[in-house]
Image (cartoon, rainbow, N blue to C red):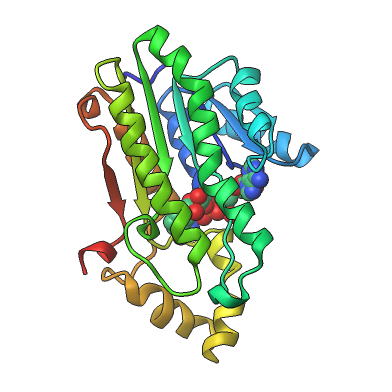
Amino acid sequence: MQISGKRAIVTGSTSGIGLGIAKELALAGAEVVLNSFSDTDEDHAIASKLAEETGATVRYISADMSKPAECRALVEKAGGCDILINNAGIQHVARIEEFPGEKWDAIIAINMSSAFHTTAAALPGMYQKGWGRVINIASAHGLTASPYKSAYVAAKHGVVGLTKVTALEAAGKGVTCNAICPGYVLTPIVENQIPDQMKTHNMDRETVIKEVMLSRQPSGEFATVEQMGGTAVFLCSDAAAQITGTTISVDGGWTAL
Ligand code: NAD
């Protein structure tokens, strides 16, 4: 398998999609670097547990993806990488008139600008080896919009644009760049939106899930972190060597509507 022995950095990977992708990459033979902004025993324990479960070498490196210098330092501390998964992300839901400026800045920094800084730090090593994969975790919200998610939708559309530019600059150098666009996946970022949506819509939990969230997803089912991981592993394979500069939707048909 093409991925065996490659080093993968997954930003924002102590939970949810990032951890799911890290696990699939580890199972496929990659050495994995997990990341989040904190530096606790719990963070390092997540890495030890993943190493035990998969038999892979797994390290945890703390770096705050809202800070450009820490994004670049993450790549340096890891010793470079062959596979870069830009996954860290946060969410805030409010009308534009009420959207706090500092939340806008944080979402743009973590969900979009961090991908620019890590990519800039990782590309030279990939070019040197003549092989690399940059995979940006965008969203169905990188292709379509929803009300009350101005910063998130702007950041994710920006990530899709960055994906195309990275692909063009890397073309012919053995390095590809693509974006995975998940629909709803039941992770902490989604769990945390449910209470607010219950209040906004005056609905119970099950009704919010069915009528607000999954109403956008024709399959009527959440996508899973394992499916995101499987898609990432595919993008690292030889079969995907000519897939670059594009988006792969894993959204139960959301963007086909
Ligand atoms: P999550 O909240 O489970 O995971 C987010 C991860 O990012 C966590 O590990 C968190 O610690 C980390 N993180 C947050 N701020 C950080 C910072 N400043 N520096 C470093 N790490 C930081 O959420 P998730 O659902 O797994 O989301 C992962 C990515 O997938 C995000 O980019 C999100 O926008 C995207 N996404 C999620 C869904 C979904 O339905 N869950 C859908 C589309 C796209």
In the image, what residue occupies the spot 37% across and 73% down?
Answer: 214
Direction from residue 12 to residue 136 in the image, left or right: left
In the image, what residue occupies the spot 40% across and 35% down?
Answer: 135
Quadrant occupied by the N terminus: top left
Q: Residue furthest bottom?
A: 202
Residue 138 seen in the current view: no
Q: Position of residue 219 (x, y in %)?
A: 27, 68
Quadrant for residue 40, please give it. top right
In the image, what residue occupies the spot 30% across and 33% down?
Answer: 235
Quadrant occupied by the C terminus: bottom left
Q: Position of residue 120 (x, y in %)?
A: 50, 25
Direction from residue 138 to residue 108 in the image, left or right: right
For the residue pair 87 and 121, the one nearer the viewer reads as 121
Residue 104 seen in the current view: yes
In the image, what residue occupies the spot 54% across and 77% down?
Answer: 95
Direction from residue 62 to residue 176 in the image, left or right: left
For the residue pair 21 and 256, the one nearer the viewer reads as 256
Above or below, 179 against 95 in this view is: above
Quadrant for residue 5, please give it. top left
Above or below, 77 against 87 in this view is: above
Count of numbered badges drawn on the protein: 0
For the residue pair 227 and 115, the one nearer the viewer reads as 115
Q: Residue furthest top?
A: 128
Q: Position of residue 16 (x, y in %)?
A: 54, 51
Direction from residue 112 to residue 133 in the image, left or right: left
For the residue pair 57 and 164, the one nearer the viewer reads as 164
Q: Position of residue 191 (x, y in %)?
A: 57, 67
Above or below, 158 against 204 in this view is: above
Above or below, 83 against 203 in this view is: above
